[in-house]
Image: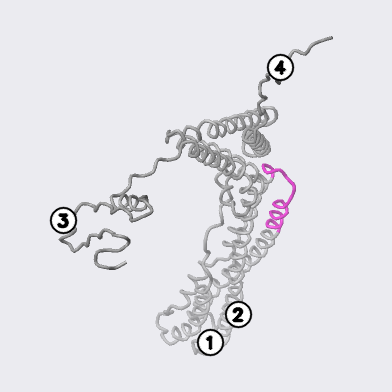
Amino acid sequence: MQHSQYTDGAAPIRRTPSNKFSFTGTSLFLASVITSLMLGVGLPNIVSGDGIMMMIKCALLAAGGMTVSYAVNRLAVERGAPLVVKGYGWAGVVSSLSILIVGGGLFSATYSGLTYQDVEQLRIEAHGEALGSFVSQRSAAAAQSSGMLAAINAVVSDLTQKRDCEIIESCISGHAGGGNGPVARTLNEKLGTALALAQQVENGEAARQRAIEQLNRLYSEYEAIASGDLSADEKRRALRGLDLSIRQAVADLDSAMPVALLGAYGEELRGSVEIEGRPDAARRITAILRPHGQAIAGLVRVLPERGDMAPAFPKQTGVSDTFVYIGHFLPIAAIAAVVELVFPICLWLYTLFALSWANWRVSPTAPRPLHPDDEALQHLLSGPSGVPDNPPLPPVNHRRERRGYRRPHSLINGYRPDGRR
């Protein structure tokens, strides 16, 4: 018969198995893994390079972020918190700062990487809206200059009629027989300038129409490419070229009308005409030309200013640009901050609180020293059940007595010497 090895009935001695999967270690490890995965997804958007080299960069950064995050957070929880309870205050400073610095760095990389493409698209769309407003403003300003053609044509028509009348009948000079005299020559000179300006204004009107059509076509192409499926680099290159073409078309639109020449001609018509030996005829010609000059000058004055320059094409999106749109991507930022900042610091604080409570239960804090008045009250309460002992009076503070301080009276059988309870 085979006897048992433990004849005294005692249980076999075994080593207590350790808890291999603690909540703290497991949760910190899972948070670090999630952080590395988010980094791996977002880093290709903010790391330069192509192919294998970019993959190596992203893998190294993600692995480094996971290792550092797990090591720093676990050291802070398992080493830093116990040292703080033991009285090492600097351990709390180092632990909290290390969690915040590492978590903040990982949060900035994770958030910017996850939102980079969307921020790039939003910036391009915002530039498109600003560019559209700029084009509309310049087109509206150019449209108001279209009244110049009617004004200069009115001058041409009136001067032609007055010149022909002067040559045939001398209707301005008043001399019989007509002819091409000084008055007719003066009118013909003004008419020649008006005809040249009318031709320039007509050409400018045609150029304005062409520029507006080109602007509409270019802006439509910009919107189509901005909302298309091209990659970020291809989209940026195409839109930059369109942006330059739109700027050139706006410049052509601004220079289509000879506004400066028209303004100078209007001021010339508003001046006085002088004809040697014919003051009366000069006054009549001045009276004819001045209303035309005032009309042209008035049209030039009401033309709107060119306004601001065209909005600059946005530069390449950077990490700091993504934080400008953090309100737009608040859920993504909140999740990244919870995983990389809020959870580690909360775990560290909860561990610190739990260790402090456990330490207090083992070794409570010593009570504070009693004040002399508190000692008298304690002596009174700890007396026998009969007549309580009279507690000793506190020492006299003559300075307080001089200020009118009233010393408490001793109690005798529950009553004060003056008979009050």
Sequence-earlier tag: 3 or 2: 2
Q: Is residue 224 magenta?
A: yes
Considering the numbered disc 3 on the image, is that residue within a helix, a strand or a loop? helix
Label 4 vs label 3, nearer the camera: 4
Looking at the image, can residue 256 be seen?
A: yes
State the mark number for residue 170: 1
Mark 4 closeness class: few <14, some 14–19, many ≥20 residues within 10 Å: few
Sequence-earlier tag: 3 or 1: 1
Mark 2 closeness class: few <14, some 14–19, many ≥20 residues within 10 Å: few
Q: How much space separates mark 4 and mark 3, taking CA atoms?
A: 79 Å
Considering the numbered disc 1 on the image, is that residue within a helix, a strand or a loop? loop
Left or right: 354, with 14 as reference point:
left
In the picture of the structure, the residue carrying the numbered disc 3 is 398
Q: How much space separates mark 3 and mark 1, taking CA atoms?
A: 127 Å
In the picture of the structure, the residue carrying the numbered disc 4 is 8
- Tell me whether circle 3 and circle 2 mark residues in contact (CB < 8 Å): no
Residue situated in front as seen by the camera: 152 or 282: 152
Dominant SS of magenta comes to: helix
In the picture of the structure, the residue carrying the numbered disc 2 is 157
Q: Is residue 218 magenta?
A: yes
Q: How much space separates mark 1 and mark 2, taking CA atoms?
A: 18 Å
